[in-house]
Amino acid sequence: MLPYVFKRLLQAVPILLAVAALVFVMFSVIPGDFASTQSSDGRAVIDAEAVARMNTQFGLDEPVHVRFGKYAAKLLTLDLGTSFRTRQPVINSLSERIWPSLQLAMAAMLFAIAFGVPLGFLAALKPGGWLDMQSMVVAVSGLSLPQFWLGLMLMYTFALLLGWFPSFGYGDGNPRYLVLPAVALGVAPLALLARTTRAAVLEVMNADFVRTARAKGNSEVRVMRWHVARNAAVIVLTTLGLQFGSIMGGAVVIEKLFAWPGIGSLLVDSVSLRDIPVVQACILLLVLFFLIVNIVVDVLCALIDPRIKYS
Amino acid sequence: MKFRANLWIGGVLFAAVIVGGTLAPWLAHTDPVMDANLMNAEVPPGSEFWFGTDAQGRDIYSRVLYGARISLTVGIVSQLINTLIGVALGLSAGYWGGWWDDFVNGLTNLMLSIPSLIFALAIMAILQPGLTSLLIALGLTNWSYTCRLSRAATLSIKQQGYVEAARSFGSGNTRIMLKQILPNIAGPIIVIGTLGMGGAVLAEAALSFLGLGIRPPFPSWGSMLSDARDQITTAPWISVFPGLAIFMTVLGLNLLGDGLRDILDPQSQSRRA
Amino acid sequence: MLKKLVFTTALTLAAFSVQNFGAQAQEPRKGGTIRFTAPYAASFVSNDSHVSNQIQDDIYGKALHRSLYNWDSANNKPVLELAKSVEVSADGLVHTFKLRDDALFHNGRKMVADDIIWTFTRLMDGSKSYPAARYVRLLKGAIDVEKGQAKEIAGLRRIDDFTLEMTFTERTEPGFLFNFATTSIYPAKEAQAPDFFNKPIGLGPFKFVEHVPGSRMVFERWEKFYKPGKPYADKLVISPMGEAAARDVAFRNKEIDVSILGPTQYVAYKADPNLSKGILEVAEVFTRNMGMNPGFKPFADKRVRQAINHAIDSELIIKRLVRDKAYRATGWLPLSSPAYDKAMQPYDFNPEKAKKLLTEAGYPDGFEFEWTATPNESWGMPIVEATIPMLAKVGIKVKVKPVEGSALGGIVAKGDFQAYIWSNTSGPDPLTAMKCFHSATPQSACNYTTYKNPAVDKLLDEAGTTGDAVKRLDLVKQANAIVYADAPVWFFNYNKAVLAYQPWLHGLQPNATELALQYFEDLWVDASSPAAK
């Protein structure tokens, strides 16, 4: 197992480098630069001379390939550069955001698992039945709502009307602050998970080894618990791993709406301020998260189902 | 074998959107852009304005109808681009194998690892807001599933001997790919395409919220919804109707996709993610 | 119309005096937490106030830092803050400041002249391009430091620890230059420590506790602040919240003490019996306008630009769409400007006249232009959308070019537009504001419409050299009138800023330069606040 994990981690390096190159090329042609964004409030005046000076300071006046060369060289020594806006190392801006971001992503995933998997299971018990219809309608509805809209609705209902949760922000780390953004972010993966679970359970229940188990006289409950659950878990986990990317994407919207201090809101801010080193670092970090989560998922799958072997 | 509720409901919903969008000039009461009358601003739904009016005094019913055109264009065109890219890459990679296959695999992994909304966000920032940019941004970022699927299907078909048979009849490579392999993988691809269309409609709304969608004066549901977010308490109808339109369309597409899968791709209920 | 304007202003003033009266009637209460919001973005730019010239960062700057001057909201002018008095030489170039000897940095060290000298020298570091360099550059010898030819600014001289002499290259009022957070005085030695900005210290009424980027900045009372008895509150939390809808919920939910309102919420809050009690309004020094590029042929003709001013029913847009959260513009200089000319009349809404002017200019069938706009609800796309049908009626077709909020400044400064809609500062100093229409001002600085009129140049030059304040105002007024008639822009409105506050928050001031800039040492919360303990 360990060599496998090591190999997967090694494989992540070229992907990260390719992402770095791609993002770098994309943002080297983006219109506007950091200096000129500073005058957009109509209050501050940044004359052409100041823009030119800032661009020299940030090294933006050099040709793209030179800039990328320098950037890649620094990246290999794990130096992410200096943020244009704070003039501090990018790693400072980033490190403060990682934990809130992970908290939110994990909470959203937990929510999705806690409700999505049982929902899918229940639906699969009597395919075509009333419960099946109900839960699938819920699932598909969850997939059909714009996330920011759902977030706003949750805010109005549970913060303003009912007063159960605070409406915004990170607070002092109290988990109450986490609830609404996590739910808003978790609804879409929940829906997908419910569907996947249903399909997986149905498929496994009709598989030969489950029929055999039934025929051997194992009780229905035992069959469900062992054979079905274990096999379905693998499919569900894989789905979850792939869904992690869309959770990270959705976080961009939800973090902005709820003033949640995560990587997503930092990314949006940095794109609009053209703080390119931070944009690059954010995207690299999100990709790294995604790759690691999927390695973990694969390892878990192998642990759950001994038939899965990695070479 | 039985009545497929999801297929029918989904089909009807989607058809309604297509009809509404196509016939918008005839069904709409007013022009969605020019007929703004500030004296009629924020009129609640009633007999004159079925869905009420927005802050500019424009008829929301008419704007929702015209908005269908944008949402449909975004959904269909971006998904066509995705499908084209995905199938072309996946099919050729599966068929040719070798270094090309490795390359396509690498590219697919790369695309899968960047969250597609973030990729689209970056592209929109570069191209600046607008319909064309949106089509490009959403059309270039969602082909990895299609690509993987086409490649896998191509590999399995290749082993089944059709291809050898066709080649022995003297068919060229392109011909084999188009005539022999493509029809065999069409089912799952249509399913993914349908579901992806729903995703594109939602992505348009999310990008509008981030200030990078398609923008006025022409109405898109996403921008209507996003613009009306400050008025949720004071004039809820401005956002309710475009919100419902998005919901119905995406719901319709999802149900349609599910229904199609049952017919076209019965053996792989669990394959998609 | 005019009467109404004056009346509204009077009302606004009356509202303040009532508020201030209320504040005085009650003894300020010590303790509690002020929960402030910074409404212009989802985060602060930096812990280093010198780096950012965004209002967002100025808001927390008022808590943490002090500059040589401060803005006196009540009298609408800059006043000395870190100095007790200043003497100006006869030629207006040499200013000698008697500094406060009781201003302590948050580590307990007394501020001395060297701290100011070091701060200004830092701002002129040519390799760092600090935004405030454009103010400090007016000091003699500052440019040499910027170019690396000198280590010290020749125009800054320490006479003793609490006496500082400044020599300028031209006649100027330093109060307009040095009252922003970008010129905050840093402790000279301490600020050079590598980790200074992890926990910055300053001279302000509140000490830095923590900054959770994208969420909040937390401060606590600085016991040794130089104004006796102040600040009142124990703690101050400032949350950056750019999303108006989210701010609305948080405010109604009593999670924050203040919120800046947009037009929609303004109406809703005014209509609400409870919320309407806590509304503070001020005519801000921002002019909303559509700039027209004379490089685009139709806009080179003054008659076309005037026609646009006549073709748009600005009054109606202000009333119905902006919900009276603005005052009709009757020139570039706003209501709250000392050079505001009450005699000026707005362009009347007159499509006939517009049509006639267009015909005279050779566009009887109109023309099409591209209009660059951001999503901003008060001076962006929604306004453009409302004008489209109006302009269409006189034959002018509008092609909308949407851009991101942060991209507008760069696009306009480069002249990459046919027309744009923007909100530009038009004060507080009227001469500085009008200089944006001097032909010597480059487009990238603030002459965005490359406006050029020798008569205006002459008036402004004269105003710049005269020592007579009354005459200066008069010259500026004349320049304003000429610019108005030349119509380089569509004169839309002056902003009315609106701040909603909770009933337990006291001591707010109507700051016309920017309503969100408040003096935290004057604010206090009474016992009814949920965060009163």
Image (spheres, rainbow, N blue to C red):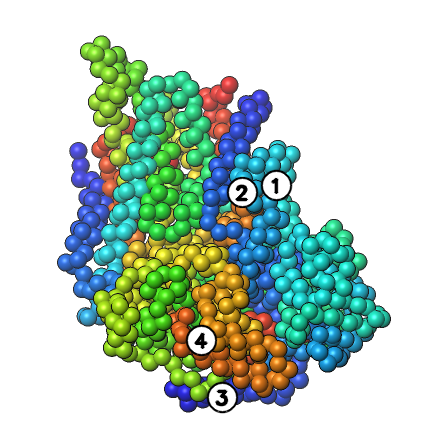
Residue drawn at (46%, 53%) of the image: A254
Q: CA distance from mark 3 to mark 1?
A: 55 Å
Q: Quarter of the image holding residue B81?
A: top left
Q: Chain of mark 2?
A: A
- Residue type for callout 1: Leu
In the drawing, does residue A30 fall left or right of residue B165? right
**Badge 1: residue crowd in 10 Å (few <14, some 14–19, many ≥20):** some
Locate residue C521: give its quadrant.
bottom right
**B195 or C376: nearer the eye?**
C376
Per the image, the residue denoted by label 2 is A280
Q: Earlier in the sequence, mark 3 or mark 4?
A: 3
| Residue at the image position 21 percent from the left and 22 percent from the top | B179
Question: Residue C309 shows which numbered tag?
Answer: none
Measured Cα–Cα span from mark 3 to mark 4: 27 Å
Q: Which residue is denoted by mark 1 in the rendering? A: A80
State which chain disc 1 sits on. Answer: A
The answer to whether marks 2 and 4 sit on the same chain is: no
Question: Which structural element holds mark 3?
Answer: helix
Q: Are marks 1 and 4 in contact (CB under 8 Å)?
A: no
Q: Are marks 1 and 2 in contact (CB under 8 Å)?
A: yes
Q: Quadrant of the N terminus of chain C?
A: bottom left
**C-alpha gap between disc 2 and disc 3:** 52 Å
Task: Look at label 4 and name its amino acid.
Answer: Val
Within 10 angstroms of label 4, few (less than 14), some, or many (20 or more) residues? many
Residue occupying the far top of the picture = B168
Q: Which residue is mark 3?
A: C10
Helix, strand or loop under label 1 = loop
Asked whether the viewer can see residue B92, the reply is yes
CA gap, disc 1 and disc 2: 9 Å
Label 1, label 4: how far apart the Cα atoms are: 49 Å
Q: Are marks 2 and 4 in contact (CB under 8 Å)?
A: no
Q: Residue C483 has which mark?
A: 4
